[in-house]
Structure formats: structure tokens, C-alpha cells
Amino acid sequence: MELQQISETGLKLYFISIPFGYNIILATCFFTSIEKALPAHILSILRGLVLIIPMAFLLSAI
């Protein structure tokens, strides 16, 4: 019963975050399509490398 309650809370948090993920991907695609390579590259690096570990610690604390 406790595991079910933990998973329900986790799934709610996960599904709340989905629109933000799409927003970052769409922003990267937008910058690529208007031939602004530097902002697209920065967003890709931040999303893929830099923000993963700090956000994992931050969100697990919440």
C-alpha cells in the first residue's frame, strides 16, 4: 500500500514535467530552423549534460 502511494505521487510529478520537456525540445528545434546554431547548441548541452545531475538532486529532495 505504501509503495502504491509513493508511485502515485511520483507519477503525478512526472506527468507535470512533460510539457516543460517538450518546450525545451521545441525551443532547440526552433533555434535550429532559424539557423541560430549557438543557442540551439547551448540548449542541447544544458539539457543533455549540465542540468541533469543538479535537477536530479533538487527534484529528489522535493
Image: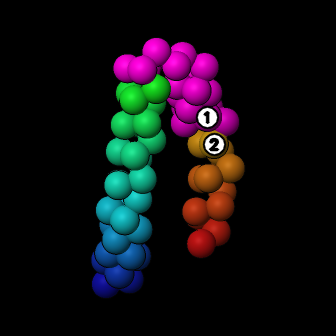
Question: Can you say whether 34 is above or below 11 in the image?
Answer: above
Left-right relation of 52 to 22: right
Q: Quick one: which residue is furthest to the front in this view? A: 34
Q: Secondary structure at mark 2?
A: loop
Q: Are marks 1 and 2 in contact (CB under 8 Å)?
A: yes
Is residue 26 in sight in this rendering? yes
> Residue 34: within the magenta?
yes
Q: Indicate how the structure is coloured in the image.
A: rainbow
Write down the quadrant of residue 26 in the picture: top left
Write down the quadrant of residue 60 in the picture: bottom right
Q: Residue at x 34, y 71 (%)?
A: 12
Question: Can you say whether 45 is above or below 20 in the image?
Answer: above
Q: Position of residue 24 (x, y in %)?
A: 45, 41
Q: Position of residue 58 (x, y in %)?
A: 65, 61
Q: Residues within 10 Å of mark 1 (few under 14, many from 20)?
A: few
Q: Which residue is mark 1?
A: 46
**Chain part drawn in magenta:** 32-50
Main secondary structure along the magenta-highlighted residues? helix
**Quarter of the image where the C terminus is located:** bottom right
Q: Which residue is mark 2?
A: 51
Is residue 7 in sight in this rendering? no
